[in-house]
Image (spheres, rainbow, N blue to C red):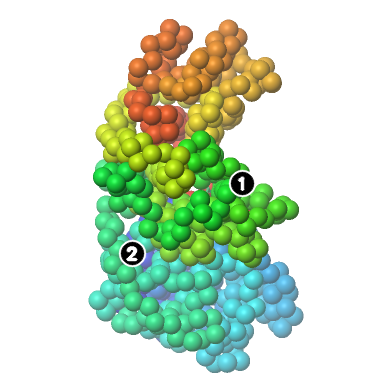
Amino acid sequence: MCGIVGYTGNKYAVPIIIDGLKRLEYRGYDSAGVAVHERNAIKIVRAVGKLRNLIEKTANLKASGTSGIGHTRWATHGKPSEVNAHPHKAGSIVLVHNGIIENYGELKARLIKKGVIFESETDTEVIAQLINFYFQETKDLFSAIIRSIKDLRGSFACAVLNEKEPDKIYLMKYESPLVIGLGDRENFFASDMPALLPYTNRIVFLKDGEIAVLTDKTYKIFDFSGNEVKREPEIMNISISQAEKGGYPHFMLKEIFEQPEAFINTVRTRLHPDKGEIVLDELNYKISERFSSIHIVACGTSYHAGLLGRIFLEELAEMPVYVEIASEFRYKKNFFNKDTLYLFISQSGSTADTLAALKKCKEAGMGTLAICNVLGSSISLEADNTIYTHAGPEIGVASTKAFSTQVSVLLLLALKIAGEKNLLKRKEIKKYINDMLSLPRLMEEALKSSENIKDIAKKFHKYTNFLYLGRGLSYPLAMEGALKLKEISYIHAEAYAAGEMKHGPIALIDENMPTFLINPESPHFEKTLSNMQEVLARGGKIIALASNNDSTTKNYTDYIIYIPHINTYLDTLLTIIPLQLFAYYCAVLKGTDVDQPRNLAKSVTVE
Ligand code: M6R
C-alpha cells in the first residue's frame, strides 16, 4: 500500500529518489521520507502529509550522498505522523517497507523482552529492529536478513541500508511488488516501473522469496536460503510519457482518453481476422476441454469487469459463471470443483484479498488463470497462466483504462471458448473481430461527448445522492459508474438493476435524487424506458445514456449522452466512457483530489 524507491550510483541520490516518489505517490500519500548515506552516517528526513512537505524539508539535502532510499506511506499500523513515517532506524540499519507484517505484535513483544526500545507504532519498525537484533549476533547483514525473514509472517517489499556499508542496498520481497532498474554505473529499485522509466528501461523483476543486493555496478539476487539466482534484465518498451500526464490536468482524464489505444494494444495481436480466430498465446490448453464452468474472483472495478465477463461467457460461450468478491471468497466455505477454472482479475496484480483467494484455490489444487495489467506482479506470478491487459501504467486511483482492457480480455475469452465449442462459426467470430478493429474509432467518437458531459455535470454536481440504473450488461456498468462517482467526487451513489426499482429503491425518488439511466440499444431497451417513466412520474430527474440511433429518449429528458452503437457486447466499452467522464467532471467541479481521492490508495496490498 506504500511506495518504495532507491538509488545507488555516481549522482546525488535525493533528487532521484524524490522524483521516483512523485511517480509512486499514487500508492499512498499520508507521509513520506528519505534516507541518504552522508559521510559514514545515514541522514533521515520524514514529513507528514503530501510529498511537497518532504520536498521542502529536503531542500538542503539535494547535494548530499549518492546512495539512498525513499518511501511514500499509506498508513496501516499507526496513524500518519512523522514518527510513524518511514524510513525506520534500528542501530546502524535503516529500512523502508511496503506491505504488512501480520505477526508484528508477537515479534515486538519478543524484542521488547530482550531490551529493544521502539519509537513508532508501526509493523515496519519491527522488521528494522529484528534485522538489527540478528545483526548484533551475526555481524553480517545478509545473514541477519535471512534470519529475520524466517520470523516474519505477512507481505513485504523492503530496502535496507547499513551505515557501515555505504555502497550497498539490500532488498527483500514477499507478496509486495519490487523491481530493479539497471543503469550505467548506477542502479535503482522501486515498487513500480514508472518510477524507474526516466532513468532506464532495463528492468529486473524480483520474485516472491528473493533478496537482492545492489551496488552502483552490480546486482545479485538470492533466494531466502541465500542461494544465488541468476536473472537477466528485460528491456521494457514502455515510454515515460505513458507514465506521465502528457498535458492533461489529471492522470484520470489522460487514462480515460487513452482507452482506444489501450484497447487496441490489448486485443491487436490476439485477433486473427483472416482465420476468424482469437489467439491467446498465454493459454497452452483449451479451456472448454478442461473446464465446464468458471469462477471469477476480484475486487472493486475488477469485480465489475468480472460481472460483465459473466454475461459474455454465459451468453456467447455457454459457460456457467459465478462471480465473487475476493474479500468474501477468501474466508468463506468453498465448494471447490476441479471442473471449474478459477479466474482472478486485478489491475495491479497485488491486491491482497485477490492474491489470498488465488492462493486458497492453488492450495486446493484448482486450475487458475489471472487477468492482470502489471507485469511480474504477485498475482500474475502465482496463477497457472496470466493474460496481460497491456493498458500501460494506470496512475489515477480510479481505475478506467484497466477496466476497459479487462472487459476486452473477457470478451476475447468468451469468443475463444465459443469458437472452441463451435457455438460461433468462423464467419461470426470474423464479424466480432472486424467490429473490434473499428471500436477504437468509435471510442474516439464517444470521447467527443466530453463537453456535453461537462455541461451536464455542471447542473448535477451539487446533488448529494444518485441512483444508477441499468439492466443486463448495463447493470454492472451502473455499478461501475456509481463507484467512480463515489470514489472521486464523494457523492453517494447506488446502482440497481432497473427491474429492482419497484422492490424498494423507488421510494427514494424525488427532485433531490437524480437517476443516471443507462439504456443503450439492447433487448432490454423498452423495459428500461418504462423504469425511466416511473422515475419521471415521481418527480425524479434523469440523465440518460442512449445509443445515437435512439429517437425516443429525448422525448423524456433534456440530459442525454449519446454513444455510438456497434453490438451489444462491444457497446459496453463505449458506454463506460461517459460514466467515467461524468464522475471526473463532477469531481473537478467539486474541487476534490481526482487522482488521489481521500482514504484510498491505488493498490490495496493489505486487508
Ligand atoms: O488492482 P486491482 O484491480 O486488484 O484493484 C481492485 C480495486 O482495489 C480497484 O479496482 C478499486 O476499486 C479502484 N479504485 C476503483 O476505481
Residue 314, position as x, y percentages in the image: 53, 38
Which residue was labeled with disc 1?
Answer: 325
For residue 129, what is the image quadrant?
A: bottom right
Which residue was labeled with disc 2?
Answer: 196
Give the vertical position of 431 relative to 375 (above or below). Answer: above
Q: Using residue 224 as the reference point, say whether residue 22 is left or right of it.
A: left
Residue 171, position as x, y percentages in the image: 47, 76
> The C terminus lies in which quarter of the figure?
bottom right
Residue at 59%, 74% in the rendered image:
127
Residue 357, position as x, y percentages in the image: 61, 57
Q: Nearer the viewer, residue 588 or 50?
A: 588
For residue 139, what is the image quadrant?
A: bottom right
Amino acid type at circle 1 is Ile
For residue 126, what is the image quadrant?
A: bottom right
Q: Nearer the viewer, residue 552 or 420?
A: 420
Give the vertical position of 206 relative to 395 (above or below). Answer: below
Residue at 43%, 12% in the rendered image:
553
Q: Nearer the viewer, mark 2 or mark 1?
A: 1
